[in-house]
């Protein structure tokens, strides 16, 4: 009996360091496999404000809803704003089978507002692994339209607990460029 108990204790002690390294709570920085580091400035409900590197600028400041639906982006003196006329979904609505079709307008700099739309579905739940840690995610596929033209098709893996996108598979329609971005570190 003692041997079995000591065996259980040994196994638990060997697993504890792996679990202790797993991030719990609300991260301040998230690093992706392409070297991109986002720094979270503020959270307000499901809204998130963060900085990220942007070509030609020191940092872009973005405000999003659940990291899925953009609201504003400022890169140097250039600002882009999306005004949603559709109510944005709450996290509790984002369950497998949920469909959304959100409409709004996008205004960039001094330009005229253009119709903007995000249509998509919550495809299901999966687990994403970062190192030895696993995180439950929602798999969400979205098509973004600007001026009634599809511009991107994205599949995001949104952590339910951390409320950050752990992985993105992005297809930029105009160029055919494909981007695959995965979280490699969380602080």
Image (cartoon, rainbow, N blue to C red):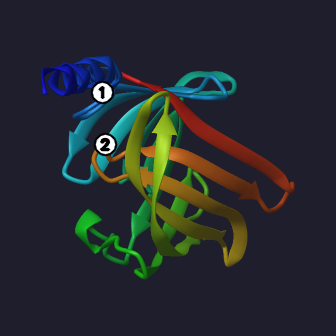
Q: Decide: is 63 above or below 51.
A: below
Residue 156 placement: quadrant:
bottom right
Neighbor class of circle 2 (other Cα within 10 Å; few <14, some 14-19, many 20+) is some
**Residue 64 x %, y %:** 39, 50
Q: Decide: is 59 above or below 70.
A: above
Q: Which residue is mark 2?
A: 162
Q: Decide: is 51 above or below 101.
A: above
Left or right: 11, with 2 as reference point:
right
Q: Which residue is mark 1?
A: 19
Residue at position x 22%, y 34% in the image: 25
Neighbor class of circle 1 (other Cα within 10 Å; few <14, some 14-19, many 20+) is few
Residue at position x 55%, y 46% in the image: 167
Cα–Cα span, label 1 and label 2: 16 Å
Labels 1 and 2: the sequence-earlier one:
1
In terms of depth relative to the viewer, which is nearer, 19 or 52? Answer: 19
| Residue 109 visible in the displayed image | no
Task: Give SS at disc 2.
Answer: loop
Question: Please, which residue is most extreme toward the right here?
Answer: 175
Which quadrant, please, contains the C terminus? top left
Residue at position x 33%, y 47% in the image: 163
Left or right: 27, with 106 as reference point:
left
| Residue 123 visible in the displayed image | yes
> From the viewer's perspective, is the residue at label 1 or at label 2 nearer?
1
């Amino acid at each position: 009996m003692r041997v079995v108990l000591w065996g259980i204790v040994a196994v638990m002690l060997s697993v504890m360091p792996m679990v202790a390294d797993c991030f719990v709570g609300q991260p301040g920085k998230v690093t992706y496999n392409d070297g991109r580091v986002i720094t979270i400035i503020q959270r307000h409900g499901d809204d998130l404000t963060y900085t990220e590197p942007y070509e030609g600028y020191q940092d872009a400041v973005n405000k999003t809803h659940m990291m899925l639906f953009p609201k504003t982006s400022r890169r140097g003196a250039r600002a882009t704003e999306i005004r949603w006329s559709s109510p944005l979904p709450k996290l509790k609505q984002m369950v497998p089978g949920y469909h959304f079709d959100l409409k709004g307008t996008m205004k960039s700099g001094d330009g005229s507002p253009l119709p903007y739309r995000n249509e998509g579905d919550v495809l299901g739940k999966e687990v994403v692994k970062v190192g030895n840690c696993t995180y439950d995610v929602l798999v969400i596929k979205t098509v973004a339209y600007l001026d009634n033209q599809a511009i991107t098709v994205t599949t995001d893996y949104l952590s339910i607990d951390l409320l950050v996108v752990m992985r993105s598979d992005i297809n930029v329609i105009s160029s055919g460029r494909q981007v695959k971005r995965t979280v490699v570190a969380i602080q």
